[in-house]
Image (cartoon, coloured by chain):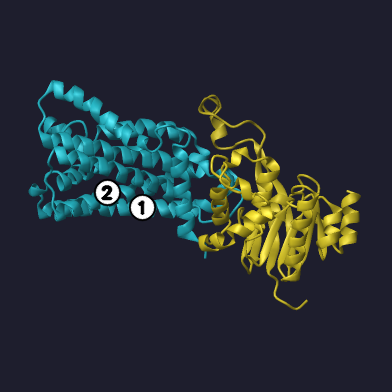
Amino acid sequence: MDKKPIIQLKNVKKSFFLPHEKHDTFIEYATNPMRLFKRAGEQYEVLKDIDMEIYPGEFVGIMGRNGSGKSTLLKIIAGIYEPTSGKVIVNGKMVPFLELGVGFNPELSGRENVYLNGIILGMKKDMLKEKYEQIVKFAELEKFMDAPLKNYSSGMQVRLAFSIAIMADADIYILDEVLAVGDVAFQEKCFNVFREYKKDGKTVILVTHSPQSVKDFCDRAVFLKDGVFQQTGSVDEVIEAYING
Amino acid sequence: MYNYLELLWQFISTDFKLRYKNSYLGIIWIILKPLAMFSVIYVIWSNIFKMDESYKMGLLLGIMIMNMFSEAILMGLTSLMSKAGVILKIKFPREVVVFSAVTISLIDFMFNMIVFLIFSIFTPIQTSLLGVLLFFLCILSIFLLTIGVSLFLSVLFIKLRDIHNLMIVILQLVFWMTPVYYTLEMLPENLQNIIKLNPLTLLVTYARKGLITANTIRFDDFIQVGIVLAVCLLVFFLGNMFFRKKVSKIAEYF
């Protein structure tokens, strides 16, 4: 591909401080003043030297066991964490769905939460007003929009959150395990949205544990283990690597 | 470009709505708190010495201003922490969170000013266009000062939770170092000089002058307030600089 990459990661490393003793209080410092200068612990390298180029229109799957650094990687791409070293270049409008319903407040009504969540996701208020009916219809919650969110079932909440999220107009979507939403019928609607994204040439990064989802949607995939890509390339190869650990 | 203003307004209106949700008196609490404080002090003080009308209105205004100041600092201080859930999931201009917290205290103050105006029907005040201008400059100074301080403290608070308790004590100290319950003239001269070092002393004094005894305003007063405003502006910019420098790592500190 000779197009310009829409997302580019160059030698990205990320480490966190992993303490070996519990959080210090003044009294602990007073009894052992040396701790002020050196806390016991180590730098734990979550991501080691990640290189990645994603081109416009690609649908890339990221697989990996729990704790392999998938979420950290997504947060770095989304700009929430800064890499310890290395470079992240993003050329396009990005909407990260690291979690559905960011900012949702249980005390507010469904309607109020649509605007709250939508605006936090970077949508314009006018646009939300325009699409409001569409959001409610997609979530199948017409009757409940004036009820406080705390009275919604968890399935209803997720449906509402998902319906808002898909209204976001962006070039890049980052989806973290959000495929497993709602019942089978609603899931089918969600999959249709993803097919729609694909048709429109959007770039999507999908993190999932489900080989089936990767097979259905992704053009290619990566398998993340111990902070490096153990396997990159075709979907089948990556799924096999993932299953074999 | 992020929908900056819409986001700011969304945070303001949400937090404003949520604060007194499920309480019967709702937003009436905004005016009830300073009014109760005023009533307590008024009843005690009026039994101790005879106060003139301008002192009474000055007391009310002073309490309202100090109330705004301490609420702004305490809400600004915890603002980043209380939005941790959102900050960890979405990238957006973080300072919006601090601005919205401090702005809420300013909105509260506006509600309180309505009460002040109602009071002024019964107890006439002496104000003028120039006086109102002086008053606005004072409030602007406090707004900038509290944002600057909050930008600084909100970042520190994430790592150092002691700051909240510490600030409660410091705010008490600031309150008593500001002539709210007393007037400067009641104090011996050497104490007056210490109290005058507190920028809030000047701001409260001139805010009162602007709204209650505007006939005594001189050109010199504007210079004094101008100097304090410049200091507050400096704090605002320093707070911003500190915040911008630290904010990129904030998500890791929670």
Q: Which chain is yellow?
A: A
Query: In the image, residue A4 lies at what x, y percent?
Result: 70, 75
Most extreme residue toward the front is A143
Q: Which is more toward the observer, A20 or A205?
A: A205
Q: Residue at x 33, y 32 (%)?
A: B33
Q: Which is more toward the observer, B188 or A153?
A: A153
Q: Which chain is cyan?
A: B
Q: Residue at x 38, y 53 (%)?
A: B238
Image-based side of A35 in relation to B156, left or right: right
Any mark on residue B139, and which? 2
Identify the secondary structure beneath mark 1. helix
Any mark on residue B135, and which? none
Image-based side of A44 in relation to B180, left or right: right
Q: Which is more toward the observer, A89 or B60?
A: B60
Q: Residues within 10 Å of mark 1 (few under 14, many from 20)?
A: many
Q: Which is more toward the observer, B179 or B209?
A: B209
Q: Residue at x 63, y 63 (%)?
A: A94
Query: In the image, residue B53 lies at what x, y percent?
Result: 11, 35
Quadrant in which the C terminus of chain B is drawn:
top right
User: Pointer 2 and pointer 1: residues touching (CB < 8 Å)?
Assistant: no
Most extreme residue toward the left is B215
Look at the picture and state if B47 lies above or below A3: above
Query: In the image, residue B155 lies at what x, y percent?
Result: 48, 45
Q: Report, in whole angstroms, how far the alpha carbon at label 2 lies from the one at label 1.
A: 14 Å
Type of amino acid under label 2: Ile
Image-based side of B183 in relation to B141, left or right: left
Identify the secondary structure beneath mark 2. helix
- Quarter residue B164 falls in: top left
Q: Chain of mark 1?
A: B
Q: Judge whether residue A111 can be spotted in this image.
A: yes
Q: Give the residue number, with chain letter if any, for mark 1.
A: B236
